[in-house]
């Protein structure tokens, strides 16, 4: 029996290391890079057009946020496909306002507004899934919001102290609360939201995994804060 298991694992390993699979992986990587590059060019082109039309980045942020909030209503009505469309539009506008700001001028209020709207949007999406199935999703959504708050508070507290100290290590608050520490980055969060909208019955599992990542992120921010605000400053004085 043990020899059969070993043989199957050996066969699986051989298949995974085959040249065809490697070529397929390389093709997928090139395709993703191509799509990402084309999307970036399109966003940049559209941002230039809006800049010439004298449209502000803050207006784009507010418009995208307003559309994103509609996802809460559709999630509560269990219309997940429509909610996903609203979420995708929100994420597109989130990329667009950043590109537009770079064409004009990045302001501190613009960074603040973008970060604040992102926090509210993500919390609203979690709330929307709780409304969709209160008996099934409420506890998992509460756990995710708990973890989300821990991560967000750690990030914002770090940003406040770093800004006060004018530290070179200060955290960029222009990103979403799921960015930091190598966990639940933008791509992973985006994929998680798509999975939740396409297969909402997986909410419990995805919420737990994402919540754990948020807690790990909060711990990583605390460690970074101790290093930058205690150890690094102590070494600088010495």
Image (spheres, rainbow, N blue to C red):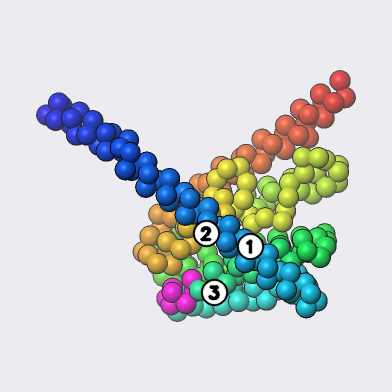
How far is mark 1 from mark 2, CA to CA? 10 Å
Viewer-proximal residue among 2 and 99: 99
Pointer 2 local density, CA inside 10 Å: few below 14, some 14–19, many at least 20: few
Quarter of the image where the C terminus is located? top right
Question: Up-down: is 7 above or below 215?
Answer: above
N-terminal label among 1 and 2 = 2
Query: Do the CB atoms of the residues marked 1 and 2 lie less than 8 Å apart?
Result: no
Residue 65, image x and y in percent?
65, 72
Residues drawn in magenta: 78-84
Horizontal side, residue 169 vs residue 63: left or right: right
Q: Is residue 189 visible?
A: no
Residue 17, image x and y in percent?
32, 35
Pointer 3 local density, CA inside 10 Å: few below 14, some 14–19, many at least 20: many
- Write the residue at 50% across / 74% down: 85
Question: Up-down: is 124 above or below 159?
Answer: below
Residue 80 on the magenta span: yes
Query: Residue 35, labelled with which disc?
Result: 2
- Can you identify the residue that label 1 sits on? 41
């Amino acid at each position: 029996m043990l020899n059969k298991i070993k043989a199957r694992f050996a066969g699986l390993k051989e298949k995974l290391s085959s040249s065809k699979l490697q070529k397929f992986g390389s093709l997928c990587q090139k395709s993703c890079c191509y799509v990402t590059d084309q999307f970036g060019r399109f966003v940049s082109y559209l941002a230039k057009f809006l800049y010439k039309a004298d449209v502000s980045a803050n207006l784009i942020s507010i418009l995208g946020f307003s559309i994103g909030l509609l996802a809460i209503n559709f999630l509560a009505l269990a219309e997940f496909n429509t909610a996903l469309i609203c979420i995708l539009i929100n994420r597109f506008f989130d990329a667009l306002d950043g590109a537009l700001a770079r064409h004009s001028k990045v302001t501190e209020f613009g960074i603040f507004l973008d970060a604040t709207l992102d926090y509210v949007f993500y919390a609203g999406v979690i709330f929307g899934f709780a409304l969709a199935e209160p008996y099934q999703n409420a506890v998992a959504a509460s756990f995710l919001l708990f973890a989300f708050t821990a991560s967000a508070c750690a990030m914002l507290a770090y940003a406040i102290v770093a800004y006060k100290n004018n530290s070179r290590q200060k955290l960029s608050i222009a990103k979403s609360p799921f960015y930091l520490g190598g966990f639940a980055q933008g791509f992973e969060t985006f994929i998680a939201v798509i999975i939740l909208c396409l297969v909402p019955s997986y909410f419990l599992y995805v919420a737990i995994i994402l919540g754990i990542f948020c807690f790990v992120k909060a711990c990583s921010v605390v460690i970074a804060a101790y290093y930058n605000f205690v150890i690094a400053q102590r070494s600088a004085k010495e």
